[in-house]
Image (spheres, rainbow, N blue to C red):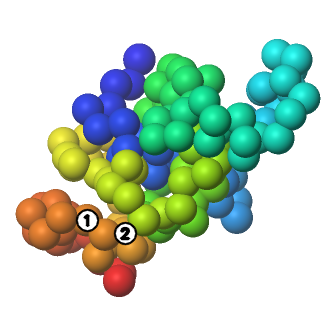
Amino acid sequence: MTTFVDFNLKLAVIEELMYSEAPKLEPWSLEDTLKAQGFDGDLWEYSVDNYFDQIVPEAKAYFENLELSTELLAGVEQLIFDGGCQVYFQCCPHWDGETEQFDVASVEDLHLLPNLKRVLGAESLAPHLRTVLESRGIELIH
């Protein structure tokens, strides 16, 4: 099983694999999952009322346990760091993109992405992380 050190980096990878214009994985929906469990209310209210400053547990469990094959990871050529990413909405439907909740803290997992060529929204990464990416020849797009 491929294990990521940084869950938020894994989320960025999932965004590319699941919610990009050409997804390689079937998109997952928190709302569909909750409905299958019998929830019939408003997703926004559910999230705000129960998990205001946290990732909804069903989303966290799903994405933590999602196995990403070596082949899928090898196909990742870009990552996008943007508060509007769909994966963040699935994790925390009320998140406004303004807090550091989904900030990447480590790029220790870069070895899992051998063909990563560019990072969009690189300005949201800490300077030392940008330095590591640049040193590996990864194009940073602000």
Q: Quadrant of the N terminus?
A: top left
Q: Quadrant of residue 92?
A: top right
- The residue where tag 2 is placed is 119
Q: Is residue 36 above or below residue 92?
A: above
Viewer-nearest of discs 1 and 2: 1
Which three-letter amino acid code belongs to the residue tagged 1? Leu
| Residue drawn at x 73%, y 42% as measured from the top left | 45
Residue at image coords 37%, 69%: 119
Residue situated furthest bottom in the rendering: 142
69 shown above or below 12: above
Which residue position holds label 1? 125
Can residue 71 be seen from the camera position used here? no
> If the image is split into quadrants, where does the C terminus sit?
bottom left
The reply to whether residue 119 is visible in this rendering is yes
- Give the left or right position of residue 57, taking residue 12 as reference: right
How many callouts does the rendering have? 2
- Give the percent coordinates (x, y) of residue 35: 86, 26
